[in-house]
Amino acid sequence: MNRINQLFQEKKNNILSIYYTAGFPELSDTVRIAKALELAGADMLEIGFPYSDPVADGPVIQASSKKSLDAGMDLKLLFEQLKTLRQEVSIPVLLMGYVNPLLQYGVENFCKSCVEVGVDGLIVPDLPMVEYEEFYQNIFEQYGISNVFLVTPQTTVERIHKIDSLTNGFIYMVSSSATTGKNLQLSQNTEDYFSRIAALPLKNPKMIGFGINGKAAFDKACQYANGAIIGTAFVSSLEKDSSSTGIAEFMKAFTA
């Protein structure tokens, strides 16, 4: 059982996961921010590895990725930085990014590097499910790396059940079909979507992300899933104050 499974076994509700971009706002900040987030009450972390064409990301995360890339961030450097991760951080950590740099690095090499530094899972929004099942599932399972798939309001029930069967971690419910950074709009359609997924007999826990910009949105998401993911709002806060004190202040809104 990896740390992700253990978390969901021990805590069923109000799980708070935080996304931020590796190497932002400063290239050497990756592990320091992870440590500060755990101390401030985060249950799980998603560290984004930046890519030059981040199609699912809104302007805030795109800008953080560009700054990180311009400073020299790549997967080799990221894994070098993460060598000290488990000396500082005990909560589950996933890497999130796009399939192109993953394939360039090599899927098996990537999974091996994750194990070496203590990364528990991977979220690759543009990795086709059929390719994962045919080419990469055995590699992920061999190294004990959870692969997290995304579902959207347009995802069919049949596909959701298929995703559930291939998942060992959690299902990432995208709150809308927009890019990251759009504030959660709780329309009737959105609530119907959340209710529809919540009612399905799925074996994996669920986390809601995209647009969770404050405590009200977090609490609403937690009514339909095991927890929620804060991304753009936290990356924006890092631009203003990335100190441990600043991070703790940001987290108080969700943990107090």
Image (cartoon, grey):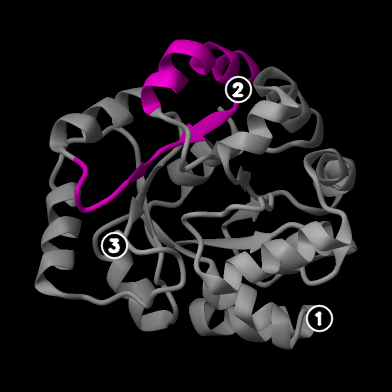
Q: Quadrant of the N terminus?
A: top right
Specify whether 20 is left or right of 219: right
Residue 55 image offset from top left, x and y in percent: 49, 54
Residue 50 image offset from top left, x and y in percent: 68, 53
Front in this rendered view, residue 34 or 176: 176
The CA distance from mark 3 to mark 1 is 31 Å
| Looking at the image, residue 156 lies above or below residue 183 | above
Q: Earlier in the sequence, mark 3 or mark 1?
A: 3
Residue occupying image coordinates x 53% and y 17%: 136
The CA distance from mark 2 to mark 3 is 30 Å
Residue 163 image offset from top left, x and y in percent: 31, 30
Q: Earlier in the sequence, mark 2 or mark 1?
A: 2
* Number of numbered discs visible in the structure rendering: 3
Pointers 2 and 3 in contact (C-beta within 8 Å): no
Q: Which mark is residue 243?
A: 1
Specify whether 256 is left or right of 142: left
Residue occupying image coordinates x 33% and y 52%: 173
The residue where tag 3 is placed is 176
Q: Residues within 10 Å of mark 3 (few under 14, many from 20)?
A: many
Report if residue 38 is visible in the image.
Answer: no
Q: Residues within 10 Å of mark 2 (few under 14, many from 20)?
A: some
> Residues in magenta?
129-155
